[in-house]
Structures are given as structure tokens and as C-alpha cells.
Amino acid sequence: MFPLKLGHCSLNKEIGVIVINSLWQQIPGGFGKIHHITQNGGLYKRPFNEAFEETPMLVAVLTYVGYGILTLFGYLRDFLRYWKIEKCHNATEREEQRDFVPLYQDFENFYTRNLYMRIRDSWNRPICSVPGGKVDLLERVSHDYNWTFTYTGKVIKDIINMGSYNYLGFAENAGPSKIPVTKVLSQYGCGMCSTRQEMGNVDKHEELETLLARYLGVESALAYGMGFATNSMNIPALVGKGCLILSDELNHASLVLGARLSGATIRIFKHNNMQSLEKLLKDAIVYGQPRTHRPWKKILIIVEGIYSMEGSIVRLPEVIALKKKYKSYLYLDEAHSIGALGPNGRGVVEYFGLDPEDVDIMMGTFTKSFGAAGGYIGGKKELIDYLRVHSHSAVYATSLSPPVVQQIITTMKCIMGEDGTTLGKQRIQQLAENTRYFRRRLKELGFIIYGNEDSPVVPLMLYMPAKIGAFGREMLKRHIGVVVVGFPATPIIESRARICLSAIHTKEILDIALKKIDEVGDLLMLKYSRHRQVPLLDRPFDETTYEETED
């Protein structure tokens, strides 16, 4: 097992979170909201402003009614299909297999054929260019209500890309990476056809891991070929039976899968809620394991840097304070925050001005800010040496492609300023400016958006099921590509468009996108916000206020 030992618990430190004021703000239309303005005694070195406006009651009711109507029509259409009145396009069991255990869950299949299929054209759109500020889209049409698609052969040019995770704009076919990557492709080829422990370890892998450890500020690092597998295959190597995982309720599916595969006991705390996390930690220390009440072998807290559906940033100073107080371990997933946060792009740890040594396991991916593929784990040398021989991702998976490794090395050096230019620094600053500007303008237009003011992931709330597909289609008509998300990826009444900002978005591009979003918002009546902005308090820089909504 993971070679660190869990010490005894200390119960005599305080986090120092003091609620200094609660304001009830009455909003036009009779809807109210509680704002907790909280000062976190010295833990934060910068303002931390995060807001989640509550769903208007009428919108919530109409959303449930919409899903109810869709469900009723779904059952009606299933009845018509059963009696061969309507043609059935979906996969069904053969007659001779009727007595077998069904391959599909009934409700999942029902949801797919009757709800998802209506708006299937909003996803899996094929692009035929790099995922830059603008993309080219292959046109497709459906003549059977999205069951099948036909490609017309036409390419739709210059679609403004508001959906890719290309935060720093390094997913490009020009720029600093082109020549080094081409050279490595010529020297090493495309793939290694072996694992790192056999014949797949090359000098480029060693160079990447050395550079990565220096970039993260940790003793050692290990690179993997797939970001999802970095979580799902490494968590089982760190914890097992007799261990406890405390997981944020909105953690990514890869973290959830890894936790389940580990065999450890899993307990969920409310999203970014430190009171909920501390209660679970206290109960874990006081009561121990179920039935036997023996102490847990290890307690592992799992959080993300930026939550990719909510746009929120983890309250890392408070998480670290709790981790130290209760002598537990911390696993931090920086898939979306590495490169995108911090003055030098070193992620959420640098964003809060914290010590990387306070995070036991630092995980991240190369698929967003670095414009490449794969993931990594950073931490103590003892931890990395252990994972090299115990992680299924490290032992059994094919090693990273050398051209991909070179892409990561080049972009990382650019971000660190080791390429002799200020391009990386400029892109980090540009992303931060774009994020604040775009979020502020959307709020001014009257949309409900979730998350932290510094998060480049911007969820714009749609709520009603009919508006999921409508928003995506109307935006595409206006040459704007967005990602729309609904149930089960989100709660059933919290469908949204997820906008991802990039450093290569110019102000002109953002203004065009805002203008079109404004038009579609009026057309579909999406401007739900009734929240009058609460002015920032006049406060010292080493303190923070944040805004939190409670039901």
C-alpha cells in the first residue's frame, strides 16, 4: 500500500472561519436569497469571490413539468413502437434472447431514445481544424430525427470556439511547438509500442518528468498516457480496504471510478463545504471503522482545483488547514486549473500562494492548458517511486507518444519562461483578463452564471430541457460553437451551457460571442437573474470575502 503512515488526530486547532454578517436580500418578484459574507481568518492571501444564484421557483417548476411532458410522450411513443405503429430505430433484444438478462437498463434506454435523441445533434459535431479560437465544422443533417446523420460535404468555416479546454491556446498547428514536435516525430516516430518498464522508456520521458517536478515545485513526478486513467488507476494503488475516502460530491467521474475500484469506504461531503468536510473528519476520528471501530488505516480527501461543470475553485487553504488538523492526506486533481490559474500558471496551489508540500498527491492533465494528452502525479519521491511499480497505469499502459511528450515540454518551458520569451506569461495574463471580462459582461446582461470570478469555465444556466438543444442550435446558426450539458451530467433542473475561455480569444471575438449570446438569451428568455450585485467590501488584501447562496 501507499507508504505513508497515518498519525494520531489533533483536535485543538481552529480554522478560524468567522461569519461576520448575513444579509437577506429581497429580489423583485418575491424571491429571496441569503448571502453569507465570510472572513477567513488569515487563510486567504487574495479575494475569493464565488457565487451560485438559486434557481427561480417558477423556472424550477416549469423544468420539472417539461421533463414530465417529455416522459409522458416517451411512454406514448414506446406504446406506438410496441404495436408497430411507429418505426423503432433503437437497438432491441432479439426474440430468442427475450428471457436473457437485459443488456441495457430500462430507464437509461428510455431516456436515450425519447429525450436524448431529440437533441442529439447538439453533441459529437465533427470539426476539421485545430481547436483554436475559431474552428471549421463538417456540416451534417438528419432526416430521421437524429437517429442517423448524413454529411453534406460542406465545411462551415470560422465558427467561434467557446467549448474547447484550450485555455492557453497551445493546441495549435503553428507557434513554438511546431518545429520541435516535428523533429521528434522524425527521430522517434509516433508511438513506442511498449510500456515504460519494458522498451517504451525514452530520454524524452525522463526529461519531461524532471521538468514537471520543477514546474510543480515537488520532489518527483510521473507522467501517464491518459488523464482519466491517472485518477482511476492510481487511487486504488494509494488506498484500499480499511481506508476512508472523503470525496467532494461534484468530483469528476474518473475520481469516482478510482475511489470505487479501490475498495475503500467512501463518504461524500457537500460541494466546497468545509463544515460538511470537517464533520466527516471528526466522525471518522471519533467512531473509526464501522462495526469494529478500529482507526482508519488512512483518510484521503479528494478534491479538484477547478470543478469543470460548476466553474468553482476549491477552497484549498481551508482544505489544507483541515487536512493538517485531522492528520489526513490530500489528493488534488488539477486537470482544469494547472496552467489556467496562478500568476505563473502553476495551478490552484500557486493561485492561493500555498506550499506544494502541503498537498500529498498532486494530479493534473496535459490535455487542457498544454494542448497535448496524458496526465501526471507529483509529490514526494517516496510516493512516485512507489507508484512506478504499483500503479496499473504505469506498469501496464503504453508509454506517452514522443511527439506528445515534446509538445508538453515545449509548452511547459514557454509557460515557465525558459524558452527565452514572455509568450507564456502573456497568455496566462490574457486568460485571466478574458475570464473576468466575460463573466462580468454575462452578469450585466442578466444571465445566471455559476462559479468563481477567476475560473475560465463559465456555466451559463439554461434549466429547461427544451432550451438545451435550442441554445446550441441557435448559437451555431450565429457561428458560435458552445457545449450544452443536461441530465444526467448535471442535476435534472440545472441544465447549462458550459463556456470555456481561452487566451487566444481576442476582445473582438468575446464581444461578438457576447452579442450573439445576448440575442439568443432574449429569443429563448434565458435571462433569469434577479440578483442585484452585492458590492465588494472595503477590506485588507490579506483577507477575503466570498458570497455563498443557501436555500
Image (tube, grey):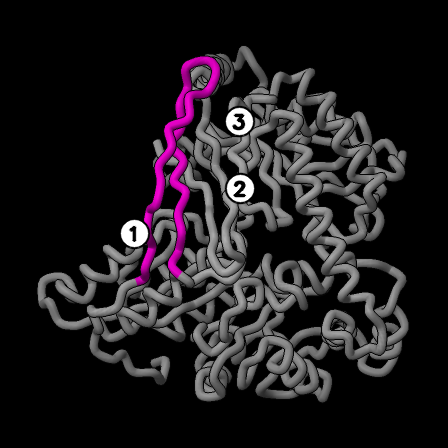
Amino acid type at circle 2 is Leu
Residue 275 numbered mark, or none: 1
| Distance from Cα at disc 2 to Cα at disc 3 | 13 Å
* Foreground residue among 316 and 179: 316
**Magenta span: chief secondary structure:** strand
- Residue 29 shown in magenta: yes
- Residue 168 shown in magenta: no
Residue drawn where x is 53% and y is 77% of the image: 378
| Distance from Cα at disc 2 to Cα at disc 1 | 24 Å
Residue 536 numbered mark, or none: 2
Residue drawn where x is 76% and y is 54% of the image: 430
Mark 3, residue position: 532
Image: magenta residue range: 15-41
**Residue 492 in the image: above or below residue 206:** above
**Residue 30 in the image: above or below residue 104:** above
**Residue 11 in the image: above or below residue 254:** below
The quadrant of the image that shows the N terminus is bottom left
